[in-house]
Amino acid sequence: MNAELTDLTEPDSPGLTADLAAFCHDLAERSKAAAGLLGAVRTAEKNRWLLAAANALEVRTDELLAANAKDVAAAPAYGLNAAAIDRLKLTPPRIKSAADGLRQVAALPDPVGEVREGGTRPNGLQVLKVGVPLGVVFFIYESRPNVTVDAAGLCVKSGNAVILRGGKEAIYSNTALHRVLAGELTKAGLPADAVQLVPTTDREAVGHLLKLGDLIDLAIPRGGESLIRRVAREATMPVLKHYDGNCHVYVDAAADLGMAERIVLNAKCQRPGVCNAAESLLVHAAVADVFLPRIGAAFAAQKVEVRGCEETRARIADAKPATDADYRAEFLDLIISVKVVADLDAAVGHINRYGSKHTDAIVTGDLAAARRFAQLVDSAAVMVNASTRFNDGFELGLGAEIGISTDKFHARGPCGLRELTTYKYVVTGDGHVRT
């Protein structure tokens, strides 16, 4: 292999695209070889790397911030809005949070080798269902460089080799983060190719890697809908995905309106550019006269643009008319669609029609209403009297996550260590033969 393709310290090095298909094939082959070794690595060695990598991130914070500054400076040229630039930006607290995430993963039980079910058959055969790694994970993502750390940590702890391909807007940040993470692998006794980065912004690299279903076991796209649809269309391996995060908050007739206001504002405004932020508010007609003017004033104070139905606009003076597209939209910005609904069933119908099966919340003091909402809403997570922002691996006690899946196979919701493994049956006999 050409040295200039294997010893990269800067993204898009000269010569990288000379034979991009061959480079990607070599990258995947090395990951496959690393996965074969990583699956047998002891938990203690994986944890040693996680802790060493966490310390290295903190020690080299200045180096990471300098690389990130290049990406942030270039962000306006890519058309990124304020929320997207916020996702892109690294700060000392965010680097520390990423490092702490690795430490939390180290503290989690190792799903590899875990006996999930088992027993002895009447004929004496012992049958065990044992957790095993998936193999090689190809992770394609946009904007958020801290995801580089989360994905690497989760994949290695679950015994998988990972190929990381971040977006062009974070290429300098991701290159620097990868340099820190990979630098600790062999010191901890792990394969050097367990964590690899695609070091080019050329979109053709993604296409080449998606053709390698014989070497890559799972593709995980995390980003905009167009990226995810492209990966789902071109992949020759299984894809774990969610297309968008059109999350709803429904304020029921029995809601505590003070609680509802706090939840809605948190869900919409705390970090509007993330997939578990609320994009749509549904309000029961019985409380619309009181709640809508109240939440409208609160939205105005937070500079949130409201797009609503006729009943909403009658109660929020500066609300704009909502279109069908607005009710389907993932705005990822300080914009929200609002609709007044006749009852809980109308709210559920709206969510199941327009939602993305990601996260939906109800605010109510009626236990029966909460139970019915949770039963009927077909989403990966349903929140009762809590912000949609809690659909997150850390917040749900799962540790770091590699993404939130709205699929139903093979994982749904926040995907952590266990979701990055599968299982096999180990059957032990004593000279048993079948008659």
Image (cartoon, grey):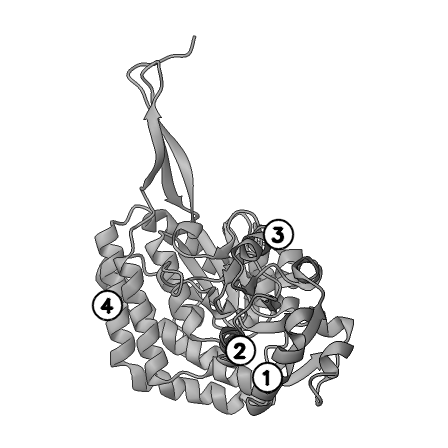
Residue at left offset 75%, top offset 72% = 325
Three-letter code for the amino acid on which mark 4 is drawn: Ala
**Residue 294 - label:** 1
Say what secondary structure mark 4 lies in.
helix
Tell me the residue that label 4 is attached to: 52
Distance from disc 4 to disc 1, alpha carbons, whole Å, reads: 50 Å
Three-letter code for the amino acid on which mark 2 is drawn: Glu
Three-letter code for the amino acid on which mark 1 is drawn: Arg
Asked if labels 2 and 3 touch by Cβ distance under 8 angstroms, the answer is no
Say what secondary structure mark 3 lies in.
helix
Question: In this view of the protein, can residue 81 be seen by the observer?
Answer: no
Distance from disc 1 to disc 2, alpha carbons, whole Å, reads: 8 Å
Q: The N terminus is located in which quarter?
A: bottom left
Tell me the residue that label 3 is attached to: 376
Distance from disc 3 to disc 2, alpha carbons, whole Å, reads: 24 Å
Determine crowd level at label 4: few under 14, some 14-19, many 20+ residues with C-alpha closer than 10 A: many
Q: Residue 254: percent from the left, percent from the top?
A: 57, 65
Say what secondary structure mark 2 lies in.
helix
Tell which circle, 3 or 4, labels the residue nearer the N-terminal end.
4
Q: Nearer the viewer, residue 170 or 412?
A: 412
Say what secondary structure mark 1 lies in.
helix
Tell which circle, 1 or 2, labels the residue nearer the N-terminal end.
2
Distance from disc 3 to disc 1, alpha carbons, whole Å, reads: 29 Å
Tell which circle, 2 or 4, labels the residue nearer the N-terminal end.
4
Q: Which of 254 and 261 is in front in this view?
A: 254
Asked if labels 2 and 1 touch by Cβ distance under 8 angstroms, the answer is yes
Tell me the residue that label 2 is attached to: 261
Residue at left offset 35%, top offset 15% = 122
**Image side of residue 340 versus residue 8, left or right:** right
Q: Residue 117: percent from the left, percent from the top?
A: 36, 34
Tell which circle, 4 or 1, labels the residue nearer the N-terminal end.
4
Distance from disc 3 to disc 4, alpha carbons, whole Å, reads: 45 Å
